[in-house]
Amino acid sequence: MKFSVDQKIFESFPDFKMGVILIKNFDNSRKMSSVEGLFRGVSAQRGKEFAVKKLNEDAMVAVWDRVYGNLGVNPDKKLSGFKELLRAAKAEESVEYESALKDLSRYFALKYKLPVVAHDLDWICGDLWLKFTDGGEPFRMKNSVDVEDAKEGEAGYVDAGGIICRYWNADECERTNITRRTVNAVLFIEDMSKIHADQFGEMLKEIQDSVSKYLGGSVESYVLGHDHYGVDMGIHGRVNMNDSKIPAQEKAYFEMKKRAELSASEPVKDAAAAVKKVKKSKPKRSLELSDADLLSGRIKVLLMQGVLRAFASDVDESDFRIKVEQPNDSENGDYACGVAFQLAKILKMSPLEVATNIKNSMPINDLVDRVEVAGNGFINFFLDQRFLENEVAVVLEKREQYGKLRAGANKKIIVEYSSPNIAKPLGVHHLLSTVIGQSLHNILNAVGFDAIAINHLGDWGTQFGKLIVAYKRWGKKKSVEKNPINELLSLYVRFHDAAEKDPALEDEARHEFKIFEEGDSENRALWKWFVEVSIDDLRNIYDRLGNVHFDYYQGESFYEPMLADLLKEGKENGVFVEGNEGAFVVMFDDENMSPLVVQKKDGATLYSTRDLAALKYRIDTFKPEKILYVVDVAQTLHFKQLFTAVEGFDWYGDEGEHISFGRMQMKEGRMSTRKGNIVRLEDVVDEAEKRAVKVVKEKNPKLKDKELVGHEVGVGAVKYSVLSQNRTTDIVFDWERMLSLEGNSGPYLQYTYARAKSILRKSQEVGEMGNFVEDGDDVAGKTRNVVAFLPKFQEALLMAAKEYKPNLISNYLYDLAQRFNSFYNNVPVLKSEDKEKREARLKIVEATAQVMKNGLMLLGINVVEEM
């Protein structure tokens, strides 16, 4: 999204300039006494200053009073943000703590006597403007459900959903309010007082440094003025927000809050005791996966035996934890352990002495060639060369099965991913959910789980009443069958356009949905057809992505018959309590969690109700170890509410877990779209294929099947770009880097595989090559560097499953590719004169290719034999 200042603002206020500070992926969850202390300190300082003078006597305040006056606003009734802080400081009023970022913004507002306002970037809808309002834009005040329409000519921050800050900086809205859950934010610093540009830049630098120091994350600052009046904020934000339409869940929360505040003054009515509250959510139970089949697990057994033999009478197994690591430097062994440091404290010995005793007490094992104790007390293990040579043979024997584990054997795990809405196109956020979810499904299957893939479709709701009306009025069956999702979306958009001119259409849509719910055969048949043709269309796009699989397509409608029993159970056990005007909600102990509405006052249910029913159905039907929801970070609160609410039911055992991921950002800015502000998944695939085919043609003009190879390389590049990055951070799309044949990219790994296969083909085609090359100095080291790394594929696989992070597989494959390319560039393979060495090295090439292929398949990426 982009933020811009309308030129009319500069024309009306020539002295105006502003700072924009973007803060991404920061931690605002903790209460920081140091930050709070800064704010309290400067507040006291300003309180003393204004104890002896009036606010409007201050030059900085007077400037903004004039600004407000020029707009026809009484500056004594409508105070700018920083003036309100000065007023509170003067009156020695305490300001309620909200969050660390909020305190920092208040601190700098008081320090510089300038408006400094913070907004949650993830809740901004579309592009944001500082402009004069047209009139009629909705504004919802912070901590309220009351909505007012702006008057014409107000100066405010306006996006597609309404006004997020009114009268410049005086009134903040509820939607973009900073909370402890905020992870991406923007600070606006406004100046009308002709502060010199250098001084203003220093102010911004101080704010930027303080944010980095206290909150972390990535921080960027910009100065906007006449010549530079816009900045790309690099976040997609929300779609289709409308501040004039408050969700029932939020209304219930604010009504509950109001009633609780009123009842606090009436001792007879204790609002907190009137309802059963669900306790705060518990920490998630992690997957318990045994590492017994891994090399690190076998070495852990050796270490435990050594510890117990050396110190059986002095320590208990519960006193220490053995962690086996992989050293970065091969000179420190293939594996290492620092358990001696833990035991040294218990035994009152030096780590070196403890480590030596453990080493001397360990049993002899054919897995390990030698064990060394480093000077600091680390125990380093070097794998036996014969074991490594045998491991190459194991890879070639097991082929596609190599690396697979049984850690999750006889257990089921559900992965829900993609989850689009019927009759709407797949967006870029569905790309992330689909790619990450499918990879996790593959990884969990590979460690032994019976992984079940579910596509939870949005196929229920009042929007289908609108779609039914639109189809009956303007729809053509052949057009829908030819291009289902695009045509249904076009009908839906046409309905909204028509409803703006004829509001009676909304009543007609409500009627159609009502009779649909009651079982009207015509509407039911239409709805069923909409769902079927949409799923067919979705499958076509999934096929283009390749390697996307679902065991079940289950929409929200699937759970409708289960809702009555769920609501009855929840009401009987006191989890669902009556709230505003007959609505039923779940109340929470956690003050940062608003009530979860499960039934509206008219008896209608919500998607939260259907999510609860889905949980129960899945637990009853599949009895899974875990149910993973691969959904973007914006839904964090919903899942926290959901999993906390369900703790009130006896049938729940902590199965649910939200596997969140960040937003997608394009390095080159927004991607062009055919319509609207949604980046479509098929647009990304189209762009990737086009760019990849161009790269393939440039690199290898004689290659056969350029289009097919280009498709695999392009799609692989997109998937790898997602899966090579930590899913919890925003994912940056950089086309040039994605499609590079060098560095950490999908094409680089595919090229490494193709290179290995080319070597193997040549060995079959020409036999001995002649022009033999003698072995260099470090042939043994380069060879071992590859061979000793092959069995560590299983280590990466198990850790990726435990942490639900496919990027750990990507990291392994990139490391393996670098080791292999170093091996091939320095070790004669086809040109080795010694036949025995040549054959052994060809087996290493073949084994490496096989592990590369197995790893890429876990990521859902196909290999190509030639590039």
Image (spheres, grey):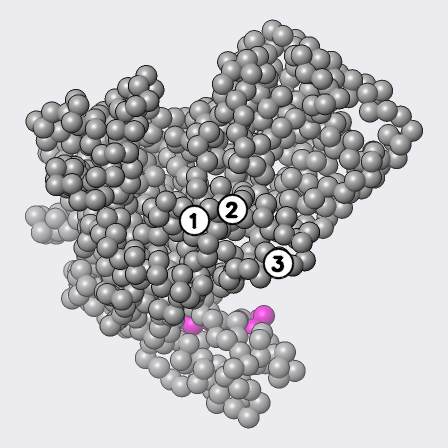
Q: Which residue is mark 2?
A: 253
Q: Where is residue 749 shown, x and y percent of the image? A: 28, 45
Q: What whole-number distance in Å separates the C-alpha atoms at marks 3 and 1?
A: 20 Å
Mark 3 or mark 1: which comes first in sequence?
3
Q: Which residues are magenta?
A: 375-382
Q: Which residue is mark 1?
A: 583
Q: Which residue is mark 3?
A: 270
The answer to whether residue 18 is above or below residue 102 is above
Badge 3 amino acid: Asp
Badge 1 amino acid: Ala
Residue drawn at x 48%, y 89% is 309
Circle 2 or circle 1, nearest the eye: 1
Along the line of sight, the residue nearer the viewer: 450 or 668: 450
SS for callout 2:
helix
Q: What whole-number distance in Å separates the C-alpha atoms at marks 2 and 3?
A: 17 Å
Q: Locate the C terminus and report the quarter of the image it occupies.
A: top left
